[in-house]
Amino acid sequence: MTETMHNTPSTARQADPFPVKGMDAVVFAVGNAKQAAHYYSTAFGMKLVAYSGPENGSRETASYVLESGSARFVLTSVIKPVTERGRFLAEHVAAHGDGVIDLAIEVPDARAAYAYAIEHGATGLEEPHEVKDEHGTVVLAAIATYGKTRHTLVERSGYDGPYLPGFTAAKPMTEPGPRFFQAIDHCVGNVELGKMDEWVAFYNKVMGFTNMKEFVGDDIATEYSALMSKVVADGKRKVKFPLNEPAIAKKKSQIDEYLEFYGGPGVQHIALATNDIVATVRAMRAAGVEFLDTPDSYYDTLGEWVGETRVPIEELRELKILADRDEDGYLLQIFTKPVQDRPTVFFEMIERHGSMGFGKGNFKALFEAIEREQERRGNL
């Protein structure tokens, strides 16, 4: 991006070379979007707001847009592949199972963001272009990231429709109730051994993201497996992307298992921010969502190092919710089991009270819980 192209003051550009407004959507390619949309409506309390399919001119794909606060999921499946996009989606589901194909980011200027990314080494997938309907104009562009994942850059300030042109407003699939979460907190990617630093450098260079946290060695290790993780984020910490790679250990790590069953790098889990993790977990459990188990022994000494939290220790124990504290405050978190038959994508519920961390104090307990599930699947 040059100053003459976009008339951006050099001081502003240096302060934040790649400004973002936040996560626009997490886009999934799935085998059956209608059934997936029903699952996220009932089990995650999300609300169907928009639809694209044969009924409104999309002959190749069906897409359902669900929201909870500012969190937006788009679930797409192929009806009959005809174009390159349709074939890509069909092949993606066949090769990887249900998974995330796009971490879309809302930006104030999609053309400027794309130009900056390409100038700094990104692979372009879609050049900036306008899409319009009676609700206004959206500017879209896309760049490639790890595996088959992409970042669509979405400029939607001139648009007031339910999602994007080509989508029509849709009625909720189920009776809307209290929302379980209100935002996407962070999105975690798994990459191959030796590739984590390469992708950290990609986000540093291509999108101007900075490093937040780094977890290596004993930070993320159990008796059997280990991994390494670094977190990149935009300047205002609206978009946070932890990146994991496996580390050499006695047995197969959760990252190795993911890479094997997903068939390569991809999005491992989405963390969803909630204001009331207790109500969220109770409602999601009642709707059939399975969470990782935590042994009682974890809670025996929890109060000694976490201190007082909004939720009493005994209620955390009952619901198997984890807690962690750092210099800025504390957080409460819990992780679902994989939400499809392949041991790949899962979710995290997180309630923050000052802490901007990722639960470092819980890594050992969390990974031991994951290892117990791996062993049950015969994959440890």
Image (cartoon, rainbow, N blue to C red):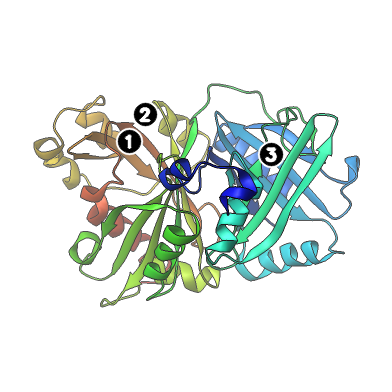
Q: Which type of secondary structure does the marked residue at label 1 adopt?
A: helix
Disc number placed over residue 278 in the picture, else none: 2
Image location of residue 337, percent across then percent down: 44, 52
Image location of residue 301, percent across then percent down: 11, 41
Mark 1 and mark 2: Cα distance apart in space: 8 Å
Q: Which type of secondary structure does the marked residue at label 3 adopt?
A: strand
Q: Viewed as shown, does residue 112 lie left or right of 199?
A: right
Residue at 90%, 41% in the rendered image: 55
**Mark nearer the viewer, 2 or 3:** 3
Mark 2 and mark 3: Cα distance apart in space: 26 Å
- Identify the residue position indicated by label 1 in the image: 319
At label 1, which amino acid type do we have? Leu
Q: Viewed as shown, does residue 103 lie left or right of 204?
A: right
Image location of residue 21, percent across then percent down: 53, 37
Q: Residues within 10 Å of mark 2 (few under 14, many from 20)?
A: some
Disc number placed over residue 65 in the picture, else none: 3
Q: Is residue 138 above or below residue 362?
A: above
